[in-house]
Amino acid sequence: MSYFRAENLSLHFGGLKAVDAVSFAVEKGEILSIIGPNGAGKSSIFNLISRIYNPTSGRLHFEDQDITAAPAFEIAKLGIARTFQNIELFENATVLSNLLVGRHRHSTSQLWQELLFLPSVRATEKVHRRRVEQVIEFLDLAAYRDKLISGLPYGVRKVIELARALCSEPKLILLDEPSSGLNVEETDDMSFWIRDMKTELGVTVLMVEHDMTLVNRVSDRVIALNYGRVLAAGTPSEVQQHPDVVAAYLGA
Amino acid sequence: MRFMFKTDYEDDIRLFPHSGYLISYGSLLVLLVIAPFVLSSYLVSQLVFVCIYATVGVGLMILTGFTGQASLGHAAFLAIGAYTAAYLQQFNVPFPLYFVAAGLLTGIIGALVGFPALRLQGIYLVIATISFALIVEEILARWESVTNGNEGMRVKTIQLLGTAVPRDSPTFYFLCLGVLILTIVGTLNLLRSPTGRAFVAIRDSETAARSMGVNVSLYKVKSFAISAAITGFAGCLFAHKLSFISPEMFTLQLSIEFIIVILIGGAFSLHGAVLGAIFIVMIDPFLTYLKDDVPGMIAGMAAALGAGSERAAHIQSNVAAFASANGLKGAIYGVIIVLFVLFEPLGLYGRWLKIKLFFQLFPLYKRATFKRQKIYVKSERNR
């Protein structure tokens, strides 16, 4: 049994088949990249997994559990965290409180306990903060800890999104174009972090990415999509040499 | 300028980050405690209104400021609290009991309003809450067996522990102050725990909140319920302060006053709710002043500048007519909202922060510090 599995996943907008009967599996502990030209349906797959869209047909399985019908917030509770292509941070809050929202799936306190801020709430709050500090250290964000998001540059925001996802201690993390908008050095850092996430934190990574250098450097396996269908799957070099993939990118 | 060296997670959790806070809030508390024994009964009564308005302000701040759900229906929540108190009082229910009942019932109704509001956003939510307020107003006027209709209801003096607490006594003032302080502390506690952060997350990006495991619908309903419950508690005190309630007290204008409280105060802080409450309560004395003293003053000035007595009298009557015109209050509210939104979007509390920073950084303060920067990442949201 695979760790995460999509079976015949489809998403149709009227006649447009954004995702068309896509099946793939992610094994525990691997880094799987999805590549493809613009509009191939990569981000749609992510939005299907995190339940922003409802699939037209098909099933999603995670850890032997059918999650096709689970509401969006349940997905995070199961341990699937994600980042967004266009950055969805909480603009008018500090970096620290953004990251603390990432801890939400681990909060157990009741409303009345929080109103009184009982010792139990205080204790779990400290645990949350310790975890967040570990992530801040891991991603080298200490300088921005107490800053408001609205004043931070793009590259930093990108890392903070990754940090927020990591704060939830996910089992599977979905990275939607982690390198878009980053310069060469920042992309380098990102590739190290993605590898470290796998080796040090034991997170399984599913990634959508355009930057082939990054894909080659970090991926264990690659899936190529075009027009909502899977063109090829395999190791990075296999996929890049696949004639259909070459045709999709360069034209036949 | 003070630099904080954080050595413990506690440093970020504490309500008073350093001793300076204790001193300033401590002295404020002392001032508030001695106030009723020093100030005139008129001013104490104004302070009571400030406490009540500030309590509602904090409630509305939770919903609008922190969760980002606008409401123009809070006058209705206040009315429900007030009428619950007045109704239960008829059956000799003791004060603590009907005080709690007022808050709870309003909270439940707030949650019920929250459900249809789940699918609405922005201006549509405002319209929905206005309609809710109008419905409540109408029910209060028509349901005569319970609310006594347009005749209104008398509210008897509070009986607490066997003693009467008249509405102009220091004890009543302390009661209102206590409710306000408890509300503020409870809200601060909420804001430093997961629920408060979930509220802010919903305000800034529902999609991201959802994908981080926040049950957006549940938390929106929670926010509505908490906000309404706080307003209900305030409503109970409000009824006692006025000693008489009738449907035409809880109109749209009152809801707008509450919005002004948080808008003028500064939309993202509890300080703002209190400052806004002080501001709104001061408008009434200002209007009285405008009516009673200003016409004479202007006429006096005109006379001093050489206008004839007839001309001065003419000016006086014109100014007096303007100052006592119907709807002047509404017009003033409108002008205030427009001016604040245009020139001081962070409200009074934002202005205070600027002044504070000016002195902290003196002489290095830059005028552009608070200028809103152009955000070059305009994210396209999956709404």
Image (cartoon, coloured by chain):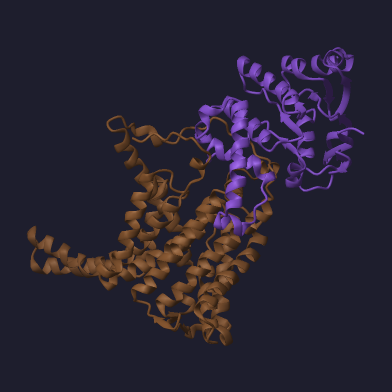
Estimate the x, y position of residue B24 in percent, counting from the top left.
Answer: 34, 50
- Total marks in image: 0
Against A146, is B342 above or below? Answer: below
Q: Is residue A54 left or right of residue B90?
A: right
Estimate the x, y position of residue B80 in percent, counting from the top left.
Answer: 55, 73
Residue at (57% x, 63% y) in the render: B129
Closer to us: B158 or B12: B12
Whether residue B252 is visible here, answered yes or no, is yes
| On-image quarter of the N terminus of chain B | top left
Q: Is residue A41 left or right of residue B248?
A: right
Against B91, is A188 above or below? Answer: above
Q: Say which colour chain A has.
A: purple
Closer to us: A17 or B114: B114
Estimate the x, y position of residue B16 in percent, counting from the top left.
Answer: 43, 47
Q: Is residue A104 left or right of residue B347?
A: right
Residue at (62% x, 21% y) in the render: A182
| On-image quarter of the C terminus of chain B | top right
Q: Say which colour chain B has.
A: brown
Whether residue B119 is visible here, answered yes or no, is no
Q: Is residue B282 left or right of residue A114?
A: left
Against B77, is A205 above or below? Answer: above
Estimate the x, y position of residue A49 in percent, counting from the top left.
Answer: 79, 38
